[in-house]
Image (spheres, helix red, strand yellow):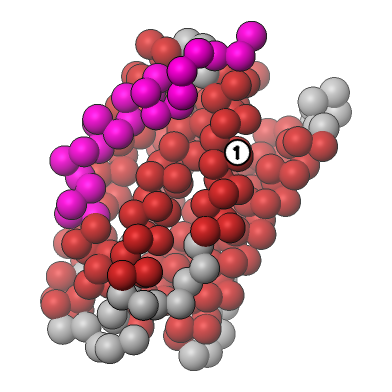
């Protein structure tokens, strides 16, 4: 049965994150004017998108009955998003950024911890069989929230980063995952609050690691 309402209202995600929007927007506004750190941030997003695509592949590869076109399309688009962010990271950086290492990836370890703890925590609460849908739903809520703010920032700064197509695909994934498992509103809200706590820890690490570099940003 298709859930009533929409994922934003059902999850309460925007309410939980209202106080975080202005600090995130301010950080991104400074970040996009700093070519070195902006490239490292994009590479971090590439890493997280790659982890998301890998999560889909690993969790679904032995489930031949559910590895349908929609799941394969989701996997392909997440992998393409990893490529999108890597390509633009290297364009902004002006040279290749092989892999995801400390030297070329903003707060690599906190980002890995964010994704790993979210995946493990949600999987523990909902069970392995339901983890793909629920983890994906919570990830898409965060991605859509963050990428919309990011897009507004780059457009205001006149920085070339064509995010609208990627956001449209993430919106599609969000609707698909919400239809799959969004009818349990109590669980959805609890998982969204859990993810918000982890996201705040990641963003705190970003702000703590780069205050001086972003205050003295180089022009893009």
Instruction: Please name the residue that numbered disc 1 is placed on.
Output: 173
Q: Residue furthest right?
A: 64
Instruction: Point out residue 114 in the picture as x, y percentages from the top left corner.
Output: 38, 45
Instruction: Point out residue 73 in the picture as x, y percentages from the top left corner.
Output: 75, 44
Between residue 34 and residue 120, name the one nearer to us.
34
Q: Residue at x 34, y 19 (%)?
A: 190
Report the label total. Answer: 1
Q: Residue at x 22, y 63 (%)?
A: 27
Between residue 195 and residue 77, name the one nearer to us.
77
Position of the C terminus, as image quadrant, is bottom left
Q: Which residues are magenta?
A: 1-24
State whether residue 47 appears in this view. no
* Residue 112 located within the stretch drawn in magenta: no
Residue 3 to residue 114: above or below: above
Q: Which quadrant holds residue 1?
A: top right
Q: Residue at x 14, y 77 (%)?
A: 215
Q: Secondary structure at mark 1?
A: helix
Instruction: Point out residue 28 in the picture as x, y percentages from the top left corner.
Output: 28, 65
Instruction: Point out residue 39 in the picture as x, y percentages from the top left corner.
Output: 42, 76
Which SS does the magenta portion mostly show?
helix
State whether residue 134 appears in this view. yes
Between residue 61 and residue 93, name the one nearer to us.
93
Residue 172 to residue 219: above or below: above
Dot 1 crowding, Cα within 10 Å, few <14, some 14–19, many 20+: many
Q: Residue at x 54, y 14 (%)?
A: 3
198 to the left or right of 7: left
* Residue 10 located within the stretch drawn in magenta: yes
183 to the left or right of 104: right
Residue 178 to residue 220: above or below: above
């Amino acid at each position: 049965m298709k859930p009533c309402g929409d994922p934003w209202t059902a999850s309460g995600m925007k309410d939980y994150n209202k106080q975080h929007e202005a600090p995130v927007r301010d950080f991104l506004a400074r970040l996009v004017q700093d070519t070195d750190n902006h490239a490292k941030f994009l590479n971090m997003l590439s890493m997280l998108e790659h982890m998301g695509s890998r999560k889909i592949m690993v969790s679904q590869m032995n489930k031949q009955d559910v590895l349908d076109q929609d799941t394969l399309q989701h996997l392909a688009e997440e992998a393409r998003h990893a490529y999108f962010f890597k390509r633009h990271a290297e364009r902004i950086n002006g040279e290749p950024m092989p892999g995801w290492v400390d030297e070329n990836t903003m707060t690599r370890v906190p980002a890995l911890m964010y994704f790993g703890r979210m995946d493990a925590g949600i999987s523990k609460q909902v069970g392995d069989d339901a983890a793909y849908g629920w983890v994906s739903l919570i990830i898409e809520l965060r991605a859509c929230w963050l990428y919309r703010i990011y897009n507004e920032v780059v457009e205001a700064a006149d920085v070339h980063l064509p995010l609208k197509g990627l956001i449209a695909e993430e919106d599609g994934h969000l609707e698909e995952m919400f239809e799959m498992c969004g009818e349990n509103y109590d669980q959805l809200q609890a998982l969204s609050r859990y993810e918000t706590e982890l996201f705040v820890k990641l963003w705190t690490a970003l702000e703590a690691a780069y205050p001086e570099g972003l205050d003295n940003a180089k022009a893009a």
